């Protein structure tokens, strides 16, 4: 494991877009537990479609999966999914904040917005993971996480269903750890 990833992490935030559901499903299927860590998923979604994404993901893991509501506390040992049509931000004490502000990178929720907020709320205790996607959202957010001494991982673009997002993440953050999904699973099982 890269030395840059051998630090105490209690918050993992995964960003994904096109091809992301399958990648996240694979990751969740391989997790044993989260222990004293929490996992937050920010996935680009259609804004006007009623989604039960947390119920879909729950089928692949025994770890509780919840859709975030405003001011909900981000507890350890659980998986949280950003709701459609809201930016997901974090308060320093660990609760969520939802905002219906303007779109960033044509997206709400925006991965960049959530990564940046997590960087300022949790500093070096956060790990940002950027998966498959067809736009550049998340690349600048990873830079914010790295600037606060957090850990950053990009899915191997050769494995991603849509490589534009991981390639963009690497272009902006060339020192990112590059991992395939099985390596991301191993890392998440290691840090818990």
Image (cartoon, rainbow, N blue to C red):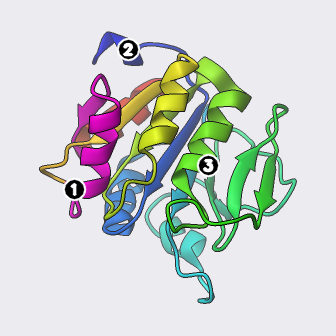
Span of residues in magenta: 160-180
CA distance separating discs 2 and 3: 23 Å
**Side of 74 relative to 168 (left or right):** right
User: Pointer 2: what residue?
Assistant: 4
Q: Secondary structure at mark 2?
A: helix
Name the spot of residue 128 as percent of width and height, x first. Answer: 48, 37
Is tag 1's residue or tag 3's residue first in the polypeptide sequence?
3
Q: CA distance from mark 1 to mark 3?
A: 21 Å
Left or right of residue 136, residue 51 in this image: right
Q: Are marks 2 and 3 in contact (CB under 8 Å)?
A: no
Which quadrant of the structure image shows residue 65? bottom right
Q: Nearer the viewer, residue 3 or 89?
A: 89
Residue closer to the observer: 39 or 43: 43
Q: Is residue 159 left or right of residue 120?
A: left
The earlier-in-sequence mark between 2 and 1 is 2
Query: Dot 1: few (<14), some (14–19), or many (≥20) neighbours within 10 Å?
Result: many
Would you say the residues marked 2 and 1 are in contact, meaning their CB atoms lie under 8 Å apart? Answer: no
Of circles 2 and 1, which is in front? 1
Q: x and y percent of residue 50 in the render?
A: 63, 88
Query: Which one is in front in this view, the residue at disc 2 or the one at disc 3?
Result: 3
| C-alpha gap between disc 2 and disc 1 | 23 Å
Name the residue at 56% across, 23% down. Answer: 9
Q: Quadrant of residue 171?
A: top left
- Of labels 2 and 3, earlier in sequence is 2
Q: Is residue 44 visible?
A: yes
Looking at the rendered structure, the secondary structure element under dot 3 is helix
Q: Which residue is mark 1?
A: 163
- Label 1 residue SS: loop
Task: Residue 113 in the image: state x and y as whole percent.
Answer: 61, 49
Q: Is residue 132 above or below residue 7?
A: below
Q: Residue at x 39, y 19 (%)?
A: 5
Residue 113: which numbered mark, if any? Answer: 3
């Amino acid at each position: 494991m890269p030395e840059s990833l051998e630090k105490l992490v209690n918050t993992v935030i995964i960003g994904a877009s096109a091809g992301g559901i399958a990648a996240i499903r694979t990751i969740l299927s391989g997790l044993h537990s989260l222990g004293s860590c929490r996992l937050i998923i920010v996935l680009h979604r259609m804004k006007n479609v009623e989604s039960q994404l947390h119920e879909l993901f729950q089928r692949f893991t025994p770890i509780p999966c919840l859709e975030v509501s405003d001011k909900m506390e981000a507890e350890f040992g659980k998986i949280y999914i950003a709701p459609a049509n809201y930016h997901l931000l974090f308060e320093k004490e660990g609760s969520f904040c939802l905002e219906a502000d303007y779109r960033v990178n044509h997206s709400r929720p925006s991965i960049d917005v959530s990564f940046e907020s997590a960087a300022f709320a949790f500093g070096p205790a956060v790990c940002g993971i950027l998966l498959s996607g067809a736009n550049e959202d998340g690349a600048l957010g990873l830079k914010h996480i790295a600037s606060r001494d957090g850990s950053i991982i990009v899915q191997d673009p050769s494995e991603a269903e849509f490589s534009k997002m991981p390639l963009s993440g690497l272009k902006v953050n060339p020192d990112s750890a590059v991992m395939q999904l099985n390596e991301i699973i191993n890392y998440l099982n290691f840090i818990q």
